């Protein structure tokens, strides 16, 4: 997500994207204000003379129903209004996730990658919990210095892109990779066991895979991230998880998302983004197959 250095990903026009983001956050703020004021109840009877004088005195004080702009929206406004650095995804790609967030937020949102779009995701999930997993420790410290409210964790990956074909074969042919369980207990090599413990304990409503780095052979690649996202989605108690994978023009993201998030669960592809909806595999008397 942080990776501005995705050479093969088309970058949206900075001016257009900035304008769109500012308008989106302004509309979101107006909706929050409207929902707050419309939920207030008003008296139906005429006030007495004594209450009239009291209300006249208090009219000069700020109205209790007025709503301050939430910090997540304020930070996003300021950031995108004062920088030419815009999110790596295009407007159409962002819109896919934004539509789901519109229905589910506030919710639990796990994002692989910490980057210039992180404030946007946090703002769109206002009131929910948005967590970022990042491979670059120095970049986390830099972002925390600028935006201390963002919740992020450092994650290490032992895989390499040049091993992706071997890992794909392992994942498709080993029975242990088709067993639904907590990733910490999985015997599949693709399951990532090194996340902070609380990451496994939360049932994530949305998961965005836009990291780690994957555009050269020595990069860690997103093999672990994609497989583990699918495993966590299946392992939830009930309901479903929306999983998004970016950069599906690349071989790893293309093959691994189809294999382990499953083409049968694919809901939409827009540009370089795929959206999968994966149901719990723990509900019902019999477990569902790994892929439908």
Image (cartoon, rainbow, N blue to C red):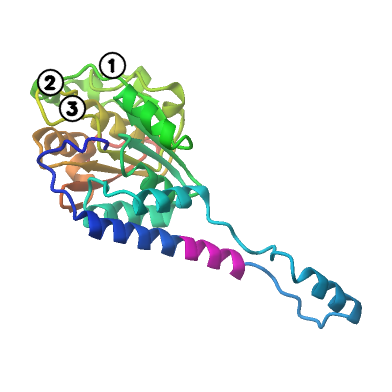
Q: Depth-wise, is mark 1 or mark 2 nearer the camera?
A: 2
Give the position of the N terminus as an image quadrant.
top left
Tally the numbered discs: 3
**Residue named by callout 2:** 218
Q: Which mark is residue 221?
A: 3
**Residue named by callout 1:** 187
The answer to whether 104 appears left or right of 93 in the picture is right
80 up-or-down from 285: above or below: below
Between 6 and 127, which is closer to the camera in this rendering?
A: 6
For the residue labelled by badge 1, is the local secondary structure a helix, a strand or a loop?
A: loop
Q: Residue furthest right?
A: 50
Determine the residue positioned at 15% across, 20% down.
160
Q: Earlier in the sequence, mark 1 or mark 3?
A: 1
Between 267 and 60, which is closer to the camera in this rendering?
A: 60
For the residue labelled by badge 3, is the local secondary structure a helix, a strand or a loop?
A: loop
Residue bounds of the magenta highlight: 29-38
């Amino acid at each position: 997500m942080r990776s501005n250095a995705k050479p093969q990903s088309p970058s949206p026009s900075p001016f257009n994207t900035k304008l769109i983001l500012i308008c989106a956050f302004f509309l979101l703020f107006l909706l929050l204000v409207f929902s707050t004021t419309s939920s207030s109840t008003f008296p139906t009877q005429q006030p007495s003379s004594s209450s009239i004088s009291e209300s006249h005195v208090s009219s000069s004080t700020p109205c209790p129903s007025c709503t301050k702009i939430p910090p997540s929206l304020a930070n996003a406004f300021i950031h995108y209004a004062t920088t030419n650095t815009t999110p790596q995804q295009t407007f159409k790609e962002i819109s896919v996730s934004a539509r789901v967030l519109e229905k589910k937020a506030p919710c639990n949102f796990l994002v692989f990658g910490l980057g210039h779009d992180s404030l946007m995701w946090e703002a769109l999930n206002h009131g929910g919990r948005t967590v970022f997993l990042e491979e670059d420790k120095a970049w986390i410290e830099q972002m925390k210095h600028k935006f201390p409210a963002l919740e992020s964790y450092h994650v290490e990956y032992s895989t390499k892109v040049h091993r992706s074909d071997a890992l794909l074969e392992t994942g498709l042919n080993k029975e242990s990779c088709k067993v639904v369980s907590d990733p910490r207990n999985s015997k599949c090599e693709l399951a990532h066991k090194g996340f902070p413990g609380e990451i496994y304990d939360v049932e994530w409503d949305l998961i965005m895979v836009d990291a780690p780095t994957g555009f050269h052979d020595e990069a860690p690649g997103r093999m672990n991230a994609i497989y583990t996202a699918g495993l966590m989605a299946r392992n939830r108690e009930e309901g479903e998880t929306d999983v998004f994978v970016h950069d599906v023009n690349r071989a790893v993201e293309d093959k691994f998302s189809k294999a382990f998030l499953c083409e049968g669960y694919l809901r939409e592809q827009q540009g370089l983004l795929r959206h999968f909806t994966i149901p719990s595999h723990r509900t019902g008397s019999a477990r569902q197959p790994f892929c439908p």
